[in-house]
Amino acid sequence: MMRNIATATAALLGLLTARPSDRLSAQSLRVPYQTFTLPNGLQVLLHEDHSVPLVAVNMWYHVGSADEKPGRTGFAHLFEHIMFMGSQHVPTGEFDKLLEATGGDNNASTAEDRTNYYEDAPSNVLALMLWLDSDRMGFLLPEITAEKVDVQRGVVQNERRQSYENRPYGLAEENILQRLYPPEHPYHWPVIGSMADLQAATLDDVRGFFRSYYTPNNATLAIAGDITPRDARQLVERYFGEIPRGPAVTRTPPPAVTLGTDIYATLEDRVQVPRVYDAWHSMKAFADGDATLDVLANVLAGGRSSRLYKRLVYELQIATDVVAFQDGGRIDGKFELWATARPGHDLSELERVIDEEVRKLALAGPTPREVERAQNTFEAQFLSRMERVGGFGGKADQLNFYNYFVGTPDYFQKDLDRYRKVTAVDVQGAVRRYLVDAHRVVLSVVPQGKPELAVKQGVTP
């Protein structure tokens, strides 16, 4: 393992110290894979890597909060919990115990467009991991009881309280989504759903959601690590082959959404200092310009050498932090920026500086060095992913990610090339099109009883 880390470090140093033209011809990032599809529709991706005696099993169900309906939100995230509550042949609590006894690890996450589950363990545990995953795909439904739903409903509601209602600034993202998207849009609500919808969910609702989406033909299984493709295929066929195909999943893309005017809003929260959020509609993941907006976010707020950090935090000392990111999904995307004020300063001060720096970028563009620094950051991230077969963002997870969003599992090199090709002119054009010439949501989160700290231009209830 240390030899592999040393090799990766040397490669990374080579990239970071190379001239831009040299980086464009740097090592190719390839993850060779084999793929097959079972008769029931389960697509399987296999990647062989014998560097360490570990194997990663990564299952993506193509369902997320965007597949829910208004008034019936939170189901996808609720199922992330229910899937660990025991299936027909694996009693409650045994999933984790069986894996932990082998030295294995597992986790899951839910997003707007997908839900993923992974297990990482020594390679001789592959059969156990596949059996566990197949049992909850094929034999969970009889074990979805009212009692289990009530237990996990309470867990999720408590999670929402901790992460949203009782967390400083925790309701900001939900407020932004509600203003960026109309009520019927799949991105209007947060992944965790609403308290009211979770409370109203019935056993029939939950079972129906499982029947519709947790099926082999709506999932992709990636296996990466110390395997032989022939043996791995035999195990997959043994454990998943007899699970019946589910109903076809059809989705109608919603109409494109734009803002007709700037929207200003104020949220009084239990916070000590105010924070301002700016959010614009951008583009979905992997659309033309998506990588350019990632580079733009890095130039604006990607670390202490970024423009907004230097101006707001170092020079003027009116903010404690600043963050920017492009968030592209399967349906749409948003570009978001937020900054937290230092005590004694209001959000109008911060917003004026943010607008000044954005306009400067629109007028003159970034320097070549700023673009190069952002590209170096993304190259380092790509190399880091290449070093791991499992976990979130490891090779198994990335194969699933690329397969779902672009239809090509081994998209590592092409994805990196998107960032390497971004120019200062591209970034300047993106600032003008998506920030300066577009409308936005401006959300001021202020301490309770201090609305005067909000951005002054057109504050609304």
Image (tube, rainbow, N blue to C red):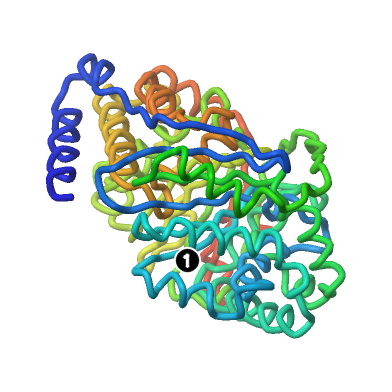
Left or right for 157, reference 168: right
Q: Mark 1 points at which residue?
A: 274
The quarter of the picture where residue 35 lies is: top right
Q: Residue 404 appears at what percent x and percent y?
A: 59, 37
Q: Residue 340 appears at what percent x and percent y?
A: 42, 60
The quarter of the picture where residue 305 lies is: top left
Tell me what residue is drawn at x 57 percent, y 40 percent: 44
Left or right for 207, reference 404: right
Tell me what residue is drawn at x 73 percent, y 78 percent: 149
Left or right for 14, reference 338: left
Check the image and name the residue furthest to the right.
204
Q: Residue 56 appears at what percent x and percent y?
A: 42, 52
Would residue 435 be visible to someone looking at this image? no
Q: Which amino acid does label 1 sit on?
A: Pro
Would residue 309 be visible to someone looking at this image? yes
Quadrant (top left, top right, bottom left, bottom right) of the C terminus:
bottom right
Tell me what residue is drawn at x 15 percent, y 38 percent: 7
Q: Residue 293 appears at what percent x and percent y?
A: 47, 32
Nearer-the-camera pick, 379 or 411:
411
Tell me what residue is drawn at x 59 percent, y 29 percent: 407
